[in-house]
Amino acid sequence: MRITTLSPILTLCLPLVVGCAGDDAGSTSDTDAASSSGASTTGSSGSTGGGGSESSSGGGSSGGESDGATTGGDAWQPAACFDHWELMAELYPEAGALGPCVDVPGGEAVVRSLLVLDGVTIDNNGQTMSPCVEARCDGDYAYIGTNSLPHYDFVQTTPNALVENDVIVRIPLAPAAIPGNADADPVSVHNGCSDAYDQYLQNSAQATTREPGLLCMFNANDKAYFQETLESGDTVTYGKIACLGRTGLVTNGSPVFGPNEATIPDPYGSPLFYMPDVAGEPYLGDDLMGGAALDLCGGHTAASMHYHGVNEACFEQDADGTPAKSYVTASQAWDMAAMLDGECVAESGIVGWSLDGYPIKGPCVCLSRDGQGNCTALKRARSSWVYAGLGAWGNDPQEDAALGIEGSACTEDVECCGGDVNGCDFRCSFVSVEGGGEGSEIAKVCTLLDYSWCSHDFVDRSTNPGGAGFVYLDRCNGVEGADGYAYHTTASFPYINACYRGEPVDVEVMGGGGGMDPPKCMPGQMMCCGDGFCGGPETPQNCPEDC
């Protein structure tokens, strides 16, 4: 695979970026308040890639109207909004002649999955912006040009402004197998989590020098692969995803990131642990601008808008490819318990693409079809990673004082925090835990915000297909369905994908930036520039050398 390394000080843009806009810190969008009102829904039904239940466009407006331009019927036209295709010769000199993806084997699935955003506008804290995603293909790759903006009005949950980030990402049209002789780590590298355990007990506010789980790539010196022999007898080699960087993209063109943040606000922790159980309930903590929380579609801002999780309702399409739902409507499908264990009534469509060329689908998996193509076995995807806690990595006599609450049954955050959730390292979360008659069960327990890779443990399910209503996913969070292999989004770790099942291209290794560590030095933001130390929130008054 080709590895692109970013410096720890993100004064440059992401790889393949045309230009970086300024990072003015904005105030919380009015949509923030709108999205937190209203009754929640179960959100248990899946959606097909071709349509949604509403005719309105998803986010902003098109042609000056609050509802997007929807022509209805089968009047789909691929998007034509990206203005920087002239950079292809520089970025991908080996590329063949580009043409319409519908004319290339494998290309139609990619281009039809992308949201058609031509003419759609969104509100960014009072500024009107136009999201864009467009695909062209040669014989081997789909090249996706995008400005990385969401397709709905911006909901600010971090200190980082929403900025355009023009980029061309390539996706293999035919996924390639990882060579069996690749230089690979054993899965036992995960034992590095004992360092995180020791660090947490010594000083819970100080991060380890790097992501300690070692199952993702933190820098260019890391091995790019790891390998294991499963209970089924198969020996499998996987590609490591970047600890802090793009692993794919969702269908609005914004990047997919892995299941962890950077060193702040909680070292290498999961942003989904900040999230409410259902739409309308509060996030963990009162100050979203100091946290790693996501919007109720699964994204937030740092160097670019990016997604750590996916609310499938946000990416439903009308027949013409435009977004089917507004953010206010789609966000009401946020329901953690239902997204983990609800009954599926329709199979999920494609919500994104991984850098190895496999599709990323929603959580409802079709496992078989009849002769007419109808799904005859529909189950909810369940991650094979379970919450085990950081305390599993050591036996220090003082452990109970710091980590004793981990894994305890709870109903509210205050039960995990001694009555005060502000500044607390724990949250009461719905997670998958080992136990129950079918291998794992969904429970609500006290979870640690820090070190998401180390607090979760992969359980080999290669000889256990799942239960009556769910199918287990593999280590990478994928499964072989009726239409081939795909990753499936889950509401528990790793949320989108934990590794690559195929050979990825253009892997980003961000060296210590990314995640919540913002790219620019702006007053009031948490930064990592100047002295190279992420000590936010930093201001011109308390850290002039950075500002």
Image (cartoon, helix red, strand yellow):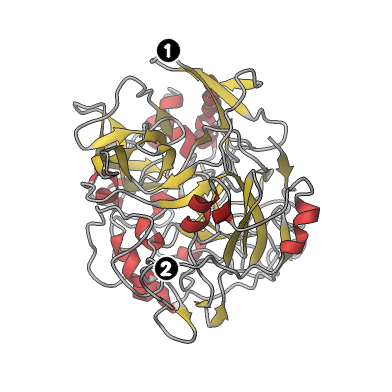
| Relative vertical location of residue 514 with respect to residue 187 in this rendering, above or below | below
| Camera-nearest residue between 188 and 15 | 15
Residue farthest toward the top in the current orientation of the protein: 233
Packing grade of label 1 (10 A; few <14, some 14-19, many >=20) is few
Is residue 83 found left or right of 51 in the rendered image? right
Say if residue 231 shows up in the picture: yes
Instruction: Kindly identify which numbered label has been placed on residue 320.
Output: 2
| Camera-nearest residue between 418 and 140 | 140
| Relative vertical location of residue 547 with respect to residue 360 in this rendering, above or below | below
The residue pinned by badge 1 equals 233
Q: Quadrant of residue 276?
A: bottom left
The structure residue drawn at horizontal position 42% and vertical position 51%, both measured from the top left corner, is 350
Gap in angstroms between the C-alphas marked 1 and 2: 46 Å
| Camera-nearest residue between 87 and 529 | 87
Residue 220 x, y percent position in the rendering? 72, 36
Please name the amino acid that badge 2 sits on.
Asp
Q: Which mark is in front, 1 or 2?
A: 2
Q: Looking at the figure, which quarter contains the N terminus?
A: top right
Q: Looking at the figure, which quarter contains the C terminus?
A: bottom right
Please name the amino acid that badge 1 sits on.
Gly
Is residue 464 found left or right of 11 in the rendered image? left
Q: Earlier in the sequence, mark 1 or mark 2?
A: 1
